[in-house]
Amino acid sequence: METRPNRRDLLKAAIGLAAGTASWAFGRTEKAGGEQSRAKENLFLLRYDTERGDPEGMKGFLEKVVEVHRSHQIPATLFCTGAALERMEMPFRSFYGEVKDDALFDIQDHSYSHIGLGYERGKPIPTLKADYERSFAVHERLFGVRPIGISMCATGGRDGNGLASFDATEKSRAELEMVASLGVRMINSYLTGVNRSRTFINYGVMGYPEIMGFPSGYPDTGWMHRRERGDPLEYILGEIRKRADRHETMPLMLHDWVAWTRAADRELTHVKRIVDAARKVGYKLVTHVDCLRNKDLWA
């Protein structure tokens, strides 16, 4: 079995990256002409956007995540809304007690109220900042650890159309400045000319070289919940094979409520099948904080 550093060691190292912490684990990327090339190893980023604060409807989910991810050695990042953490405080406290020293599990933030960044018509900066500050405070109260990563939230048209990037408007630039002021060190890749589902970046061009941008894509709200691509597993397994053939990073965005209430069973069987298929075609599974610590991947 692969030996992995524990979660606390990873967080300490990741927070210290701006001071020049060394990289680890899965090889260097080379840069040519200002563009970042792909990693030497194909990386698979599995995450759960954890937002359904329903203690009864989600009963057993976190326990099953621990069971399945440990038995199959599946790294995963949970991006949690503060509101869901508060509504399910006891289950999350128990979950954190189980995984706090386990490097398979990375716990980060998804805003307090599922608030949106990067929209034409969005909330004012003070409102956005207060929402994230509230969520970070919940993380600190429950876990004693401040998150350093954010996954951006889709708001279903409430805030108008999504912009192309953080550098698109004065307000979106101010949004990145705001999250940087909160100590965020990783967020979605969201720059002009960047393929958001394929490319690791840093935000040095905007003055924040210490912030990593990570690829994001393939939300299960589309391919599993709404079944927009036909059979869910047939579609996503096909995409994994295509990406592996092109030596591309494969992000997978799962949601707690979709994985638990829209899948064929409550054993996370689809997660196990997806991971088995990814490993067979050469993917290395990593958490987001693993990638942050491997500074050669993005800096």
Image (cartoon, rainbow, N blue to C red):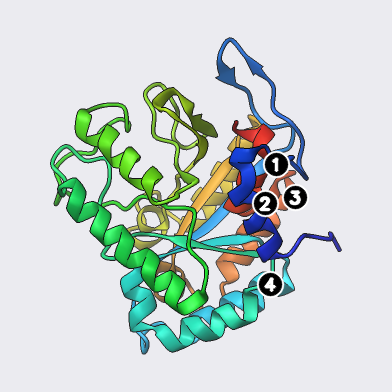
Q: Label 4, on which residue?
A: 101
Per the model, the C-alpha gap separating discs 1 and 4 is: 21 Å
Vertical arrangement, residue 108 with respect to residue 52, above or below: above
Classify 10 Å Cα crowding around label 4: few (below 14), some (14-19), many (20 and above): some
Circle 3 — which element? Answer: helix
Tag 2–tag 1 contact (CB < 8 Å)? yes
Image position, residue 27 (x, y; %): 77, 35
Residue sitting at the far front: 19
**Amino acid on which the number 1 mark rests in the picture:** Thr
Q: Earlier in the sequence, mark 3 or mark 1?
A: 1
Classify 10 Å Cα crowding around label 3: few (below 14), some (14-19), many (20 and above): few
Q: Is residue 28 left or right of residue 170?
A: right
Q: Is residue 81 visible?
A: no
**Amino acid on which the number 2 mark rests in the picture:** Ala
Per the model, the C-alpha gap separating discs 2 and 1 is: 7 Å
Query: Image quarter for residue 110?
Result: bottom left
Q: Residue at x 64, y 18 (%)?
A: 31
**Amino acid on which the number 4 mark rests in the picture:** Asp
Circle 1 — which element? Answer: loop
Q: Label 3, on which residue?
A: 280
Image position, residue 203 (x, y; %): 46, 31
Q: Is residue 189 left or right of residue 245?
A: left
Indicate the quadrant containing the C terminus: top left, top right, bottom left or bottom right: top right
Q: Is residue 256 left or right of residue 101?
A: left
Circle 4 — which element? Answer: loop
Image position, residue 86 (x, y; %): 35, 80
Q: Label 1, on which residue?
A: 21
Per the model, the C-alpha gap separating discs 4 and 3 is: 28 Å
